[in-house]
């Protein structure tokens, strides 16, 4: 057994201290705490707290000790907010960038509107839940403190669906999303439904008042349209479509984008998805939206056509990693919104810089690639006006940011 003092928190939420052979990672510990336990390969798997931190609080979720979804529920809200700001500051600092970060916008407990459950058959029934920390075991979490109540209420429906398509060998993934029509359920990696099973699946949809059920990419039944509102514009989302995790988080990111862009137009929206930013912006200025998935573009364009008082909006399917929008194609653009996947968008950022697009609203779910892409823009003559940190994956290590960059 070794005793160490935790000096800092890592980017994934583990406490870090110094052991006999260097850094030691200890889950669910906090800076200033004195802990002891067995160290194996640089990790203290079951640390015992000898001296707790004043920032330690009692976790609100009864499943916290086993579920891997949350990593810092044992820390005070103020500490978590400061830690997430620090993650962004450290990422920027690695490129020599100093920025004044705004107060973190944090989503409330019980507000996560989308999640992916793991489903598995057992000898006695069905397992429904989320993976444990660094573990393939499914942890039952009927009282999850993060999820919207509607997502907890469909566990019975998921159990019935698991009996139709899950096996004891493999795990079925069930994506669930809160919509105005009810919960949308997207089943993946399940056994194909035989004709008799389809009838049973349809009965589950109506019996549990689901909005829609999709099975391995095919719509099995739709009771009501799975509609969400993006900036007040109703959108019927495709199965498994990416959405911001909470309405509050989406609103915080959208407010940042709208502040960054102002009334500048026309705007290009890059990695536009279903229109999280394109649709509200199109109420004020012309928008050109680019996205790699046709289903998302179809949903975006249909919502725009049905909207009232919208400015012109065009959509184009384009893989912006392989074919970034070139400087000549950006001629006359007053502002750009860019919200890439975790890998960032280095090639597209270079094109924006070369085109000298006056304003850029940069949205990211990865502080490391955000910092890299921001450094590229700063070296091309832009200035970083402000950075807003958004915490919509409460108690996790995930961080979102939205920032305004303008030509210096």
Image (tube, grey):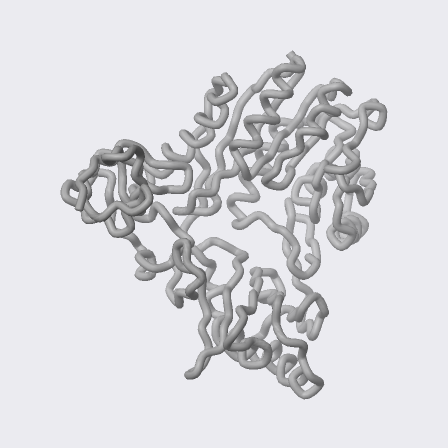
Nearest the eye: 352 or 182: 352
Q: Position of residue 332 (x, y in %)?
A: 82, 23
84 shown above or below 291: above
Question: Which residue is found at the position 48% from the left and 22% from the top?
Answer: 94
Nearest the eye: 252 or 373: 373
Residue that sits furthest to the bottom in the current view:
196
Q: Where is residue 27 in the image (x, y as percent from the top left)?
A: 31, 46
Question: Which residue is found at the position 59% from the left and 77% from the top?
Answer: 165
Occupied quadrant, residue 369: top right
Q: Where is residue 128 in the image (x, y as percent from the top left)?
A: 46, 70
Nearest the eye: 380 or 136: 136
Q: Where is residue 156 in the image (x, y as percent from the top left)?
A: 48, 76
Question: Which residue is found at the position 61% from the left and 26% from the top?
Answer: 373
Occupied quadrant, residue 68: bottom left
Left or right side of 52 for 152: right
Residue that sits furthest to the left in the current view:
50
Question: Which residue is found at the position 70% from the left and 37% from the top?
Answer: 281
294 shown above or below 367: below
Count the labels in the image. Answer: 0
Left or right side of 19 for 279: right
Left or right side of 28 for 340: right
User: What is the quadrant of the C terminus in the image?
Assistant: top right
Nearest the eye: 303 or 321: 321
171 shown above or below 294: below
Occupied quadrant, residue 260: top right
């Amino acid at each position: 057994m070794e005793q160490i003092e935790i000096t800092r928190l890592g980017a994934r939420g583990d406490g870090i201290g110094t052991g006999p052979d260097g850094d030691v990672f200890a889950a669910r510990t906090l800076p200033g705490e004195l802990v002891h336990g067995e160290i194996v390969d640089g990790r203290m798997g079951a640390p015992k707290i000898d001296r707790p931190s004043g920032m330690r609080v009692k976790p609100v979720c009864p499943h916290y000790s086993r579920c891997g979804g949350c990593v810092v529920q044992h820390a005070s809200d103020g500490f978590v907010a400061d830690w997430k700001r620090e993650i962004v500051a450290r990422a920027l600092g690695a490129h020599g960038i100093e920025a004044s970060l705004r107060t973190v916008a944090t989503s409330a407990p019980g507000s996560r509107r989308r999640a992916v459950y793991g489903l598995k058959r057992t000898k006695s029934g069905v397992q429904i839940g989320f993976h444990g920390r660094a573990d393939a075991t499914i942890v039952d979490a009927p009282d999850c403190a993060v999820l919207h109540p509607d997502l907890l209420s469909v566990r019975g429906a998921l159990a019935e669906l698991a009996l139709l398509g899950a096996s004891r060998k493999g795990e079925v993934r069930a994506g669930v999303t809160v919509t105005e029509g009810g919960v949308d359920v997207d089943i993946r990696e399940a056994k194909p439904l035989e004709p008799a099973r389809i009838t049973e699946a349809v009965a589950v949809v109506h019996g549990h008042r689901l909005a829609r059920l999709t099975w391995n990419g095919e719509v099995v039944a739709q009771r009501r349209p799975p509609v969400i509102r993006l900036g007040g514009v109703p959108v019927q989302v495709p199965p498994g479509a990416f959405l911001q995790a909470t309405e509050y988080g989406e609103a915080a990111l959208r407010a940042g984008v709208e502040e960054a862009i102002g009334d500048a137009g026309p705007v290009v929206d890059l990695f536009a998805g279903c229109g999280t930013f394109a649709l509200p912006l199109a109420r004020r200025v012309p928008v050109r939206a680019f996205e790699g998935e046709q289903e998302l573009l179809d949903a975006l364009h249909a919502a725009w056509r049905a909207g009232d008082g919208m400015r012109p909006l065009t959509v184009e399917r384009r893989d912006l990693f392989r074919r970034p929008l070139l400087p000549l194609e950006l001629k006359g653009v007053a502002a750009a919104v860019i919200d890439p996947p975790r890998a960032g968008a280095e090639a597209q950022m270079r094109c924006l810089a070369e085109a000298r697009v006056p304003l850029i609203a940069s949205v990211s779910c990865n502080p490391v690639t955000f910092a890299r892409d921001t450094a590229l823009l700063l070296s091309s003559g832009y200035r970083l006006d402000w950075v807003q940190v958004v915490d919509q994956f409460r108690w996790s290590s995930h961080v979102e940011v939205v920032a305004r960059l303008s030509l210096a």
